[in-house]
Structures are given as C-alpha cells and as structure tokens.
Amino acid sequence: MRTLKIEKSRARNWYSLPESVRQRCKDVLEAIAGTEKVTNHPKVTLMDGTHKTIYRARIGEYRVIFTTYRGELRVWKAGNRNGVYGDINTTYDRVTV
C-alpha cells in the first residue's frame, strides 16, 4: 500500500477545494493507493504527454493529477475539470519523477 502525500508546493490548491470534495477525493485516492497497480482502478487514467508516470483520477466533476514514486502517491494538482488542465505543462515541468 502506498501512502498519500500532497506536494507542499500544491497544498494551497488542494485546500481551496470544498471540504466535502476534498474528503471524497481523499477516499478515492486512498482506494487507489491500496491497489497493486494504480491503472487497475476504474477512475485512473495515464495522462498523455512526455511523462509516462503522471496519472489522472476522475472524481465527479473534479480531477486529481498525481504520480507514484517509492511507495507514495503524490498529488500534484486537484480541481474542477474545467480548470485543472489549464497550466498542465507547468505541472509536467514540476514533476521530476
């Protein structure tokens, strides 16, 4: 099982979500962290792009972008589906895994 970690630089993004949405996202992310392979979870998709380790979880109208690394599930970005992909290239650049 992986541990859930919110990247420090992205914590403000996570805490800007409504409490009920954060809890729902956390529940889904904990379920994802408990799977053998994250892509086996029905809400997870590997994102397109140059990085092959960035995943997206679809949780209602919200999306959570995360990576897995050394037993951790690291959340990089979370938000409404309309705005979460806006600066995705910046997120790609921050992910060094």
Image (tube, rainbow, N blue to C red):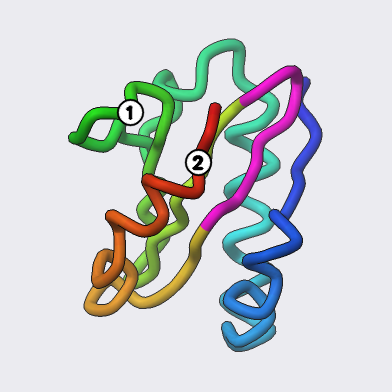
Say few, some or many: other residues with alpha carbon within 10 Å of mark 1 (under 14 / 14 to 19 / 20 or more).
Answer: some
Tell me what residue is drawn at x 70 percent, y 55 percent. 7
Is 73 displayed left or right of 96 in the figure? right
Q: Which residues are magenta?
A: 69-76
Question: Residue 4 location, x and y as percent?
Answer: 75, 43
Q: Nearer the viewer, residue 32 or 78?
A: 78
Tell me what residue is drawn at x 33 percent, y 28 percent. 51
Q: Which residue is mark 1?
A: 51
* Mark 2, secondary structure of its residue: loop
Question: Residue 44 location, x and y as percent?
Answer: 38, 36
Q: Are marks 1 and 2 in contact (CB under 8 Å)?
A: yes
Q: Which residue is mark 2?
A: 95
Q: Is residue 81 a member of the stretch shown in magenta?
A: no
Tell me what residue is drawn at x 33 percent, y 22 percent. 52
- Height in image: 28 above or below 51? below
- Height in image: 17 above or below 51? below
- Height in image: 5 above or below 37? below
Q: Nearer the viewer, residue 74 or 88?
A: 88
Is 58 displayed left or right of 22 in the figure? left
* Mark 1, secondary structure of its residue: loop
Q: Earlier in the sequence, mark 1 or mark 2?
A: 1
The quadrant the N terminus occupies is top right
Amino acid type of the residue tagged 2 in the rendering: Val
Q: CA distance from mark 1 to mark 2?
A: 9 Å
